[in-house]
Amino acid sequence: MAASEPATSPPTTITAAAAPRVPIPKNGVDYRGTVVLAPMVRSGELPSRLLALKYGADLVWGPETIDRAIIGTTRRLNPHTNTLEWSRLPTSKIKNPHLDPENRESVLYRIHPELEKGKLIYQMGTANPELAVEAAKMVAADVAGIDVNSGCPKPFSTAGGMGAALLKTPDLLCNILTSLVEQVGKPYEIGISVKIRILDNADDTRALVSRLVRTGITGLTVHCRTTPMRPRERAIRDQLSMITSICHEAGVACVMNGDVTSRTEALALMQQYGADGAMIATEAEKNPSCFRPDAAGGALEWKTHWKTVVAEYMKLALLVENRWGNTKYLLGQMIPGREEAYKAMNRSKCYSDVVRALGLEDVKMDGEDGVTLAEKAKIVDGHLGIPKEELSKAQKRQRVKESQMVEGEGAETPEAKRVRIPDAAVVDGSIASTAEVATALAA
């Protein structure tokens, strides 16, 4: 295990105010002076990002999306929610269309072009410059920046040479970043950035960062843990001042990540270590109000105010018709486990169920002419087709058999790019998480 953080922090040699600055593209954003939402599987989906912005996050990162997952998707506007969605048919539905007679596509990525305008950073998992460029072009016109994930230590990312595995292949990582800067950042006038972890040896970190800041990126985020470290292990900040100094010498913004729990703490740590911004991850899962500035009341006391934040989350989840499985997962993070509401939420099978379980039936939706959450939940359940029909194993086998019989009679299979997405990852017509998709694509 890495050594613990020293009691006294080293002085910052170059301040952000005195540093040169790389030009910020017209459609990009400056990371300086920001407190932002980290890229997280499940917790980085659309309603979570909107709630973070509502409570004061300056920018939000979407969940890591693998390059080959987004390539070949169809971009379209959802008329029910005014959200942009990138979707495709999964292999299972192409092979067996009778499993889903409505032929609903799986949504790989979803954004709100109005509420996230100028605030959303798209994070990509990649280990190939050509695929990175092709994937980035799919979303570049709709986001404020493209961020390359070279810090995720989980097997679904590193198995394909992505995530933290890129820290061991700096030539490849620099090639990816340079390609994105030249072929995506400049044409679309958005910034390219990278998220890394510290290395065991400070000199190795210094050498890596010194190369990365010369690729043309506008920002670098450093997670102050080494690759083997888990979130429960205390972040190590003894390399942070060195990293920020290197970034400032090159005019690149440096964002810190690791054990940041509120805006107040973020600003204090930024001042202490000379970082330009701070990223909040774990704390934002259970308490999105952690982004509130002190002038607006600061982070709410969670044990007594969780119902307020949950109600706001439900409004946004219904507004964008979020995938039910993801909403239920996030409610499980935000509702204290000892509360009776937690048990009732766990028994819920659709939005109408959970609105009743939380006692939110009469709460009004924002800007929808007095529509209550109960009324909105009924509409959304209908659009999502939940609760879903429970099929027995025999019924599922029969549907597959019928599908095979139809194909045997010469019926045409829908034309679509076949990307293997595990059946377990598809719930309510959407992808359960990018983790399952990444595992399949990296195999």
Image (cartoon, rainbow, N blue to C red):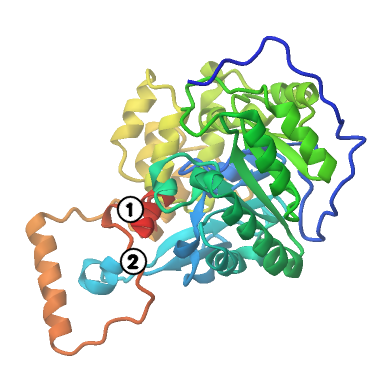
Local crowd size for mark 2, using a 10 Å CA cut-off: few (<14), some (14–19), many (≥20): many
Q: How many marks?
A: 2
Measured along the vertical axis of the image, is residue 381 above or below residue 329?
below
Type of amino acid under label 2: Pro
Q: Nearer the viewer, residue 247 or 422?
A: 247
Q: Residue at x 37, y 46 (%)?
A: 325
SS of the residue under disc 1: helix
Q: Position of residue 312 (x, y in %)?
A: 56, 37
Measured along the vertical axis of the image, is residue 155 above or below residue 10?
below
Residue 38: which disc?
Answer: none
Left or right: where 259 falls relative to 181: left
Q: Position of residue 316 (x, y in %)?
A: 55, 45
Q: Nearer the viewer, residue 287 or 420?
A: 420
Mark 1 in CB contact with mark 2 (< 8 angstroms): yes
Measured Cα–Cα span from mark 1 to mark 2? 10 Å
Q: Which residue is mark 2?
A: 90
Q: Earlier in the sequence, mark 1 or mark 2?
A: 2
Q: Nearer the viewer, residue 309 or 405?
A: 405
Type of amino acid under label 1: Ala
Residue most extreme to the bottom: 410
**Quarter holding residue 140:** bottom right
Q: Residue at x 60, y 33 (%)?
A: 198
Left or right: where 241 falls relative to 231: right
Residue most extreme to the top: 7
Q: Residue at x 31, y 38 (%)?
A: 348
Q: Position of residue 411 (x, y in %)?
A: 21, 87
Q: Position of residue 32 (x, y in %)?
A: 80, 40
SS of the residue under disc 2: loop
